[in-house]
Amino acid sequence: MPTQSSKTSKSPSRYSVGMFSAGEARCDRWQELAHAGQTLVAQSSSGSSTKETLATVEALLAPLSAMETFRAYPGEAMMSALKDALSRRDYSSFSRITNRIAKAIITGSYRRSANAWKVGEEGEKEGNDRLMKDYFDTGDLTKPYFEVLIVSDDPTPEQVRQSRAELRQLRRPEDPFVYEAVTVPSFEDGILGVVLNADVQAVVIRDNFRFKSQFDAPLLRTYLQQHLSLEPGSMEPKNHGVALARAIRKIRPELDVYLIIDGAVEKMASHLDSKNIRRVFYGIEDLMEIHLALMEG
Protein backbone atom coordinates (compact mmCIF):
# COMPACT_ATOMS: atom_id res chain seq x y z
CA MET A 1 0.00 0.00 0.00
CA PRO A 2 1.12 3.63 -0.51
CA THR A 3 2.75 4.23 2.87
CA GLN A 4 6.21 5.41 3.82
CA SER A 5 7.02 2.00 5.26
CA SER A 6 9.83 -0.38 4.51
CA LYS A 7 7.98 -1.54 1.42
CA THR A 8 9.11 1.52 -0.47
CA SER A 9 12.71 1.18 0.65
CA LYS A 10 13.36 -2.37 -0.50
CA SER A 11 16.20 -2.97 -2.89
CA PRO A 12 15.07 -2.91 -6.53
CA SER A 13 13.69 -6.24 -7.74
CA ARG A 14 14.04 -7.49 -11.28
CA TYR A 15 10.76 -5.85 -12.30
CA SER A 16 12.24 -2.38 -11.87
CA VAL A 17 13.76 -2.01 -15.32
CA GLY A 18 10.57 -3.21 -17.01
CA MET A 19 8.32 -1.01 -14.90
CA PHE A 20 10.42 2.14 -15.20
CA SER A 21 10.93 1.69 -18.95
CA ALA A 22 7.20 1.04 -19.37
CA GLY A 23 6.39 4.20 -17.42
CA GLU A 24 8.83 6.27 -19.46
CA ALA A 25 7.51 4.82 -22.72
CA ARG A 26 3.97 5.65 -21.65
CA CYS A 27 4.83 9.27 -20.83
CA ASP A 28 6.77 9.65 -24.08
CA ARG A 29 3.93 8.28 -26.20
CA TRP A 30 1.35 10.53 -24.58
CA GLN A 31 3.59 13.56 -25.07
CA GLU A 32 4.05 12.62 -28.72
CA LEU A 33 0.31 12.14 -29.12
CA ALA A 34 -0.39 15.53 -27.51
CA HIS A 35 2.09 17.16 -29.90
CA ALA A 36 0.47 15.39 -32.86
CA GLY A 37 -2.92 16.63 -31.69
CA GLN A 38 -1.69 20.22 -31.65
CA THR A 39 -0.26 19.71 -35.14
CA LEU A 40 -3.64 18.44 -36.37
CA VAL A 41 -5.34 21.58 -35.07
CA ALA A 42 -2.79 23.83 -36.80
CA GLN A 43 -2.97 21.90 -40.08
CA SER A 44 -6.77 21.81 -40.21
CA SER A 45 -6.95 25.53 -39.43
CA SER A 46 -4.54 26.38 -42.23
CA GLY A 47 -6.04 23.94 -44.72
CA SER A 48 -2.87 21.84 -44.86
CA SER A 49 -2.89 18.08 -45.38
CA THR A 50 -3.36 16.07 -42.19
CA LYS A 51 -2.70 12.66 -43.75
CA GLU A 52 0.82 12.17 -42.41
CA THR A 53 -0.03 13.44 -38.93
CA LEU A 54 -3.10 11.21 -38.75
CA ALA A 55 -0.90 8.22 -39.58
CA THR A 56 1.36 9.20 -36.69
CA VAL A 57 -1.64 9.51 -34.38
CA GLU A 58 -2.92 6.05 -35.32
CA ALA A 59 0.53 4.53 -34.81
CA LEU A 60 0.72 6.02 -31.31
CA LEU A 61 -2.89 5.48 -30.27
CA ALA A 62 -3.11 1.76 -31.05
CA PRO A 63 -0.45 0.59 -28.55
CA LEU A 64 -1.52 3.23 -26.02
CA SER A 65 -5.08 1.89 -26.09
CA ALA A 66 -3.75 -1.55 -25.15
CA MET A 67 -1.41 -0.24 -22.44
CA GLU A 68 -4.10 1.88 -20.80
CA THR A 69 -6.33 -1.16 -20.17
CA PHE A 70 -3.91 -1.98 -17.34
CA ARG A 71 -4.50 1.34 -15.59
CA ALA A 72 -7.47 3.05 -13.99
CA TYR A 73 -6.52 6.43 -15.45
CA PRO A 74 -7.43 7.86 -17.95
CA GLY A 75 -10.24 5.31 -17.94
CA GLU A 76 -12.96 4.25 -20.31
CA ALA A 77 -14.87 7.55 -20.45
CA MET A 78 -11.90 9.71 -21.39
CA MET A 79 -10.43 7.21 -23.86
CA SER A 80 -13.82 6.85 -25.54
CA ALA A 81 -14.21 10.63 -25.78
CA LEU A 82 -10.71 10.95 -27.24
CA LYS A 83 -11.33 8.31 -29.93
CA ASP A 84 -14.77 9.74 -30.69
CA ALA A 85 -13.32 13.21 -31.23
CA LEU A 86 -10.71 11.77 -33.60
CA SER A 87 -13.31 9.81 -35.59
CA ARG A 88 -15.40 12.99 -35.96
CA ARG A 89 -12.28 14.94 -36.99
CA ASP A 90 -12.90 17.26 -34.07
CA TYR A 91 -9.18 17.88 -33.72
CA SER A 92 -9.64 20.68 -31.20
CA SER A 93 -11.38 18.35 -28.73
CA PHE A 94 -8.94 15.55 -29.51
CA SER A 95 -6.00 17.84 -28.79
CA ARG A 96 -7.54 19.18 -25.59
CA ILE A 97 -8.30 15.73 -24.16
CA THR A 98 -4.94 14.28 -25.19
CA ASN A 99 -3.08 17.21 -23.68
CA ARG A 100 -5.02 16.88 -20.43
CA ILE A 101 -4.23 13.16 -20.18
CA ALA A 102 -0.55 13.69 -20.98
CA LYS A 103 -0.18 16.37 -18.30
CA ALA A 104 -2.04 14.33 -15.69
CA ILE A 105 0.13 11.27 -16.32
CA ILE A 106 3.40 13.19 -16.27
CA THR A 107 2.56 15.17 -13.12
CA GLY A 108 0.53 12.44 -11.39
CA SER A 109 -2.30 14.91 -10.84
CA TYR A 110 -4.94 12.20 -11.39
CA ARG A 111 -3.99 10.84 -7.95
CA ARG A 112 -5.10 14.02 -6.19
CA SER A 113 -7.31 16.05 -8.55
CA ALA A 114 -10.83 15.11 -9.59
CA ASN A 115 -10.58 17.52 -12.53
CA ALA A 116 -7.98 15.30 -14.16
CA TRP A 117 -10.63 12.59 -14.55
CA LYS A 118 -13.21 14.85 -16.21
CA VAL A 119 -13.56 14.79 -19.97
CA GLY A 120 -14.63 18.42 -20.18
CA GLU A 121 -17.52 20.16 -21.89
CA GLU A 122 -16.37 19.84 -25.49
CA GLY A 123 -17.47 16.62 -27.12
CA GLU A 124 -18.67 15.18 -23.82
CA LYS A 125 -21.42 12.58 -23.95
CA GLU A 126 -24.23 11.85 -21.55
CA GLY A 127 -22.85 8.32 -21.14
CA ASN A 128 -19.53 9.69 -19.98
CA ASP A 129 -21.27 11.81 -17.36
CA ARG A 130 -23.06 8.72 -16.07
CA LEU A 131 -19.90 6.64 -15.96
CA MET A 132 -17.95 9.22 -13.97
CA LYS A 133 -20.70 10.52 -11.67
CA ASP A 134 -20.25 7.91 -8.94
CA TYR A 135 -16.51 8.62 -8.85
CA PHE A 136 -16.91 12.32 -8.09
CA ASP A 137 -19.75 11.69 -5.66
CA THR A 138 -17.74 9.25 -3.53
CA GLY A 139 -14.08 9.87 -4.37
CA ASP A 140 -11.60 11.57 -2.08
CA LEU A 141 -8.39 12.24 -3.95
CA THR A 142 -6.86 14.17 -1.05
CA LYS A 143 -5.87 10.77 0.40
CA PRO A 144 -2.95 8.66 -0.83
CA TYR A 145 -3.99 6.88 -4.00
CA PHE A 146 -3.29 3.39 -5.29
CA GLU A 147 -4.80 0.86 -7.68
CA VAL A 148 -5.98 -2.71 -7.18
CA LEU A 149 -5.53 -5.20 -9.99
CA ILE A 150 -8.43 -7.68 -10.24
CA VAL A 151 -7.89 -10.84 -12.30
CA SER A 152 -11.23 -12.36 -13.26
CA ASP A 153 -12.51 -14.62 -16.02
CA ASP A 154 -13.80 -12.60 -19.01
CA PRO A 155 -16.02 -10.02 -17.30
CA THR A 156 -18.22 -7.96 -19.59
CA PRO A 157 -17.63 -4.18 -19.76
CA GLU A 158 -20.84 -3.67 -17.82
CA GLN A 159 -19.71 -6.09 -15.09
CA VAL A 160 -16.39 -4.25 -14.84
CA ARG A 161 -18.17 -0.90 -14.48
CA GLN A 162 -20.57 -2.32 -11.90
CA SER A 163 -17.77 -3.89 -9.85
CA ARG A 164 -15.80 -0.64 -9.91
CA ALA A 165 -18.85 1.34 -8.82
CA GLU A 166 -19.60 -1.11 -5.99
CA LEU A 167 -16.06 -0.81 -4.66
CA ARG A 168 -16.25 2.99 -4.80
CA GLN A 169 -19.47 2.93 -2.78
CA LEU A 170 -17.63 1.15 0.04
CA ARG A 171 -15.39 4.15 0.69
CA ARG A 172 -15.64 5.53 4.22
CA PRO A 173 -14.47 8.86 5.65
CA GLU A 174 -12.10 7.02 8.01
CA ASP A 175 -10.36 5.08 5.22
CA PRO A 176 -6.66 6.07 5.09
CA PHE A 177 -6.41 5.56 1.31
CA VAL A 178 -8.49 5.77 -1.83
CA TYR A 179 -8.08 3.24 -4.61
CA GLU A 180 -9.35 2.45 -8.09
CA ALA A 181 -9.80 -1.04 -9.54
CA VAL A 182 -8.33 -2.32 -12.81
CA THR A 183 -9.80 -5.60 -14.10
CA VAL A 184 -8.01 -7.98 -16.48
CA PRO A 185 -9.22 -11.39 -17.76
CA SER A 186 -6.14 -13.64 -17.97
CA PHE A 187 -2.91 -14.91 -16.40
CA GLU A 188 -0.71 -13.04 -18.87
CA ASP A 189 -2.74 -9.84 -18.41
CA GLY A 190 -2.21 -10.18 -14.66
CA ILE A 191 1.55 -10.26 -15.21
CA LEU A 192 1.37 -7.27 -17.54
CA GLY A 193 -0.72 -5.38 -15.00
CA VAL A 194 1.89 -5.59 -12.24
CA VAL A 195 4.77 -4.90 -14.64
CA LEU A 196 3.21 -1.94 -16.46
CA ASN A 197 1.33 -0.25 -13.62
CA ALA A 198 3.37 1.15 -10.73
CA ASP A 199 0.15 2.35 -9.05
CA VAL A 200 -0.92 -1.26 -8.43
CA GLN A 201 -0.29 -2.05 -4.75
CA ALA A 202 -2.57 -5.07 -4.30
CA VAL A 203 -3.94 -7.88 -6.48
CA VAL A 204 -7.29 -9.67 -6.12
CA ILE A 205 -7.35 -12.99 -8.00
CA ARG A 206 -10.60 -14.81 -8.70
CA ASP A 207 -10.72 -18.53 -9.45
CA ASN A 208 -10.59 -20.12 -12.93
CA PHE A 209 -9.46 -17.72 -15.64
CA ARG A 210 -7.73 -18.26 -18.95
CA PHE A 211 -3.98 -18.10 -19.48
CA LYS A 212 -3.53 -16.23 -22.77
CA SER A 213 -3.67 -12.46 -22.99
CA GLN A 214 -6.28 -10.69 -25.09
CA PHE A 215 -3.44 -8.69 -26.69
CA ASP A 216 -0.69 -9.71 -29.07
CA ALA A 217 1.06 -6.35 -29.41
CA PRO A 218 4.85 -6.74 -29.87
CA LEU A 219 5.60 -4.31 -27.02
CA LEU A 220 3.45 -6.25 -24.56
CA ARG A 221 4.91 -9.57 -25.73
CA THR A 222 8.36 -8.19 -24.99
CA TYR A 223 7.40 -7.52 -21.37
CA LEU A 224 5.89 -11.00 -21.04
CA GLN A 225 9.04 -12.62 -22.40
CA GLN A 226 11.08 -10.75 -19.79
CA HIS A 227 8.94 -11.71 -16.81
CA LEU A 228 7.07 -14.94 -17.57
CA SER A 229 8.49 -18.41 -18.26
CA LEU A 230 5.24 -20.41 -18.11
CA GLU A 231 3.55 -21.53 -21.31
CA PRO A 232 -0.16 -21.81 -22.20
CA GLY A 233 -1.48 -25.27 -21.37
CA SER A 234 1.20 -25.99 -18.77
CA MET A 235 -1.41 -26.08 -15.98
CA GLU A 236 -5.15 -26.38 -15.43
CA PRO A 237 -7.21 -23.20 -15.12
CA LYS A 238 -8.11 -24.12 -11.52
CA ASN A 239 -4.42 -23.72 -10.63
CA HIS A 240 -3.92 -20.41 -12.40
CA GLY A 241 -4.69 -18.32 -9.31
CA VAL A 242 -1.99 -19.73 -7.05
CA ALA A 243 0.50 -19.89 -9.94
CA LEU A 244 -0.16 -16.23 -10.71
CA ALA A 245 0.37 -15.31 -7.06
CA ARG A 246 3.75 -17.08 -7.14
CA ALA A 247 4.72 -15.34 -10.38
CA ILE A 248 3.76 -11.94 -8.97
CA ARG A 249 5.87 -12.59 -5.87
CA LYS A 250 8.95 -13.10 -8.06
CA ILE A 251 8.29 -9.89 -9.97
CA ARG A 252 6.95 -7.58 -7.23
CA PRO A 253 7.34 -9.21 -3.81
CA GLU A 254 5.97 -6.16 -2.02
CA LEU A 255 2.45 -6.65 -3.40
CA ASP A 256 -0.31 -8.17 -1.29
CA VAL A 257 -2.34 -10.84 -3.08
CA TYR A 258 -5.89 -11.90 -2.17
CA LEU A 259 -7.46 -15.06 -3.59
CA ILE A 260 -11.18 -15.58 -4.16
CA ILE A 261 -11.90 -19.30 -4.64
CA ASP A 262 -15.11 -21.18 -5.41
CA GLY A 263 -14.11 -24.55 -3.94
CA ALA A 264 -13.23 -25.60 -0.40
CA VAL A 265 -9.98 -24.07 0.76
CA GLU A 266 -8.96 -27.37 2.36
CA LYS A 267 -8.53 -28.91 -1.10
CA MET A 268 -6.10 -26.14 -2.03
CA ALA A 269 -4.23 -25.96 1.27
CA SER A 270 -1.15 -27.73 -0.06
CA HIS A 271 -0.95 -25.27 -2.95
CA LEU A 272 -1.38 -22.08 -0.92
CA ASP A 273 2.32 -21.73 -0.22
CA SER A 274 3.00 -18.36 -1.81
CA LYS A 275 4.12 -16.01 0.95
CA ASN A 276 2.48 -12.99 -0.64
CA ILE A 277 -1.05 -14.49 -0.42
CA ARG A 278 -2.39 -12.35 2.39
CA ARG A 279 -5.89 -13.79 2.62
CA VAL A 280 -8.26 -16.27 0.94
CA PHE A 281 -11.91 -15.41 0.39
CA TYR A 282 -14.61 -18.01 -0.29
CA GLY A 283 -16.73 -17.42 -3.38
CA ILE A 284 -18.79 -14.24 -3.32
CA GLU A 285 -18.13 -12.85 0.14
CA ASP A 286 -19.12 -9.48 1.49
CA LEU A 287 -17.34 -6.86 -0.63
CA MET A 288 -16.80 -4.83 2.51
CA GLU A 289 -14.56 -7.61 3.85
CA ILE A 290 -12.39 -7.31 0.75
CA HIS A 291 -12.36 -3.53 1.05
CA LEU A 292 -11.31 -3.69 4.71
CA ALA A 293 -8.62 -6.24 3.89
CA LEU A 294 -7.21 -3.87 1.24
CA MET A 295 -7.20 -1.00 3.70
CA GLU A 296 -5.50 -3.12 6.35
CA GLY A 297 -2.90 -4.40 3.89
Image (cartoon, rainbow, N blue to C red):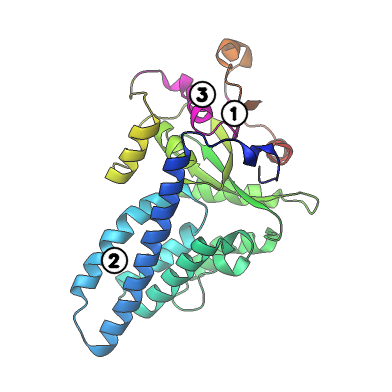
Can residue 217 be seen at all in this image of the molecule?
A: no
Residue under the point 36% across and 60% down: 29
| 62 versus 223 height, above or below | below
Residue name at image x 43 percent, y 75 percent: 96
Residue closest to the eye, 25 or 197: 25
Q: Which residue is mark 1?
A: 260
Q: CA distance from mark 3 to mark 1?
A: 15 Å
Q: CA distance from mark 1 to mark 2?
A: 40 Å
Where the N terminus falls, by quadrant? Answer: top right
The residues tagged by marks 2 and 3 sit, at their Cα atoms, a distance apart of: 38 Å
Q: Which mark is residue 140?
A: none
Report x, y in % for residue 80: 41, 63
Please identify the residue farthest to the front as the structure is shown. 11
Q: Position of residue 6 (x, y in %)?
A: 68, 37
**What amino acid type should be assigned to the residue bearing mark 2?**
Val
Q: Which residue is mark 3?
A: 246
In the foreground, 16 or 235: 16
**Mark 2 vs 3, N-terminal side:** 2
Which residues lie in the magenta part? 234-261
Q: Check the image and name the residue furthest to the right.
A: 174
